[in-house]
Image (tube, rainbow, N blue to C red):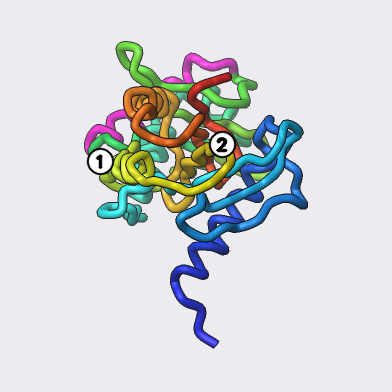
Amino acid sequence: MAVNRADLVARNELRIFRLFAPACPLAIEDDSIEKREPPEPDILCRIPTGQLAFEMGEIVDEENVARPQGDSFALMDVMRGAARKLPRNIKDAFANAWIGVRFRDDYSLQRRRRTAEHMVNELLHLDVAFSGEYAITDGGVELARAEINRNEGIRGPLFRIQPVGHFNPIPSEALLRKFNKRYQTAHPIELVAYYDRQEAPLQQQIDRLLGFIEANLNISQFNRVWIFNCRDSRICARFPQA
């Protein structure tokens, strides 16, 4: 039997909310979660203070969500080339390093190439045993973020880049549609604005999205908006905080 698109969307929203619920500090009761039909908000559940409704909304650039793998391969070539030029003692110190890199989504490939080479050169300034996250910044703007993990079973350094396309990292059109929509429910409503097909952006871009939410929340029925990244089940931010 064919499954229509509305059923697929409903199943996906329920799946995402079940990822969100344990990450949320509201103590959502798992066995109370139920999918609802319009004009109600998408989800109804129970928290210790009573019932609470949630609308679900994906943050995604519908026009440009595809991420070309070719850019990723080109950037890894840049980083491998820069690594080959490092002094021998630095290359040896990072031989067991797996380096995952995420660039700003709104930068051109040319600018990401320059940042990639700069990032490799910054290895010179790190402790030779460094592991964990570090950011590459320019004038207070975060250009990229890398996570270094150590594994004695590899011969590196190995670079992996999350591919990005030229899409808007903080598309707001979908949120504005949710803010303008009218819902019928006897319960308070909150919005889960989630990144799923599109990876959550860097923190400075999240802050810009929060500014948009703060400026427009008053036209909506929502008491609060949560920004949730499905890929690591992480709440990136919420507004208001209380």
| Residue located farthest toward the top when viewing the structure as drawn | 139
Instruction: Identify the residue shown where x is 30% and y is 54%.
Output: 62
Helix, strand or loop at mark 1: helix
In this rendering, the answer to whether 142 lies above or below 228 is above
The answer to whether 237 appears left or right of 140 in the picture is: right
- Residue density around tag 2, few if under 14, some if 14–19, many if 20 or more, within 10 Å: some
In the picture as drawn, the residue positioned furthest to the front comes out as: 186
Q: Main secondary structure of the magenta part?
A: helix
Q: Name the quadrant of the C terminus.
A: top right
Residue at the image point whose x is 23% and y is 38% from the top: 108
1 or 2: tag closer to the N-terminus: 1
Query: How many labels were placed on the picture?
Result: 2
SS at badge 2: loop
The residue identified by callout 1 is 109
Residue drawn 36% across the image and 46% down it:
181
Image quarter where the N terminus lies is: bottom right
Q: Which mark is residue 156?
A: none
Look at mark 2 in the image and give the residue it sits on.
Answer: 188
Residue 239 location (% of width, % of height) = 48, 25
Give the crowd class for mark 1: few <14, some 14-19, many >=20 residues within 10 Å: some
Residue span colored magenta: 109-127
Answer yes or no: is residue 176 visible.
Answer: yes
Is 115 a magenta residue? yes
Left or right of 185 on screen, residue 199:
left
Q: Nearer the viewer, residue 192 or 149?
A: 192
Residue 117 visible (yes or no): no
126 horizontally vs 114: left or right: right
- Image location (x, y in percent) of residue 141: 34, 18
Q: Residue 7 at x, y = what percent? A: 51, 70
Q: Is residue 99 above or below residue 88?
A: below
Amino acid found under the numbered disc labelled 1: Leu
Q: How much space separates mark 1 and mark 2, taking CA atoms?
A: 44 Å
